[in-house]
Image: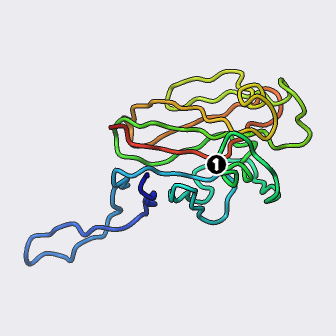
Amino acid sequence: MSKPAVAATASTAAVPTPAATAPAVAVPAAPVAAGLPIRIKAGATAPYTDSSGNVWLPDQGFVDGDVVDRDNDAQIANTQDQAIYRTERYGMSSFSYKLPNGKYIVKLHFAETYDDITGAGQRVFSFNVAGHEFKDFDVWAKAGGAKRAYVETVNVDITDGKLDITFTTNIQSPEINGIEIIPAS
C-alpha cells in the first residue's frame, strides 16, 4: 500500500546571522517532495483519496484550459478508482511542478469522457514530458474506446528543479485526468 502524498508547500526559513547584526531575513524554502509521490487530480476542486489510501491533490500546476466534472454515475472501465477519471483539465498548454532534482516515474491518467468524441481520430494531441515527446496521442485509440482509463508511464530525470509538460492541440483540445509524480528508487 502506497503512503499518502504530501503537498509541497511554500514556507520560509530564517537565514542565520552572526551575533549583533540585523535580524534574520525570511527567504522561501526549496520545494520538498519528502520522498513521497505527488498525485494531482486534474479538474478537481478538493483533495481525493483513492482506494489504496493515496491522497490526490486538487487541480494545480496547469497553464490555460478549463475543467469539467462529469456525473458521479459515469462508469469508467479499466480502473478501481473511477472518480479520478470523472474530472479533467482540457485545452491546457502546459503543466509545471517544482521538484528536487532526481529520477521520477510520471504517470499520466487519461479517459475519453466527452460525449461528442465517438471514435478514434476525433481527439488527437501531442505532449512532451521533460523532453520525452508523444506525438499524435489519441486517448480513444490508446484506451480502446470511450470511458476507459489509460495510463501513460514516463521515466524522467529532473535536472532543473521542476517537471515541465507541454501540450499541443492537433485535433480537438488536449485533455488529462490525473498526474502522478513518483520518485524512482
Residue 25 locus on image (x, y percent): 27, 70
In the depicted structure, whether residue 142 falls above or below residue 35: above
Q: Nearer the viewer, residue 15 or 146?
A: 146
Residue 167, percent from left and from top? 66, 34
Name the residue nearer the viewer: 89 or 17. Answer: 89
Residue at image point 38% right, 53% down: 33
Q: Residue at x 88, y 35 (%)?
A: 117
Along the horizontal axis of the image, is 69 left or right of 160? right
Q: Quadrant of the C terminus?
A: top left
170 lies above or below 24: above
Report crowding for label 1: few under 14, some 14 to 19, many 20 or more residues within 10 A (C-alpha): few
- Identify whether 169 is placed above or below 37: above
Q: Amino acid at mark 1?
A: Gln
Question: On the image, numbered disc 1 is attached to which residue?
Answer: 80
The tally of labels here is 1
Residue 111, relative to residue 86: is it above or below?
Answer: above
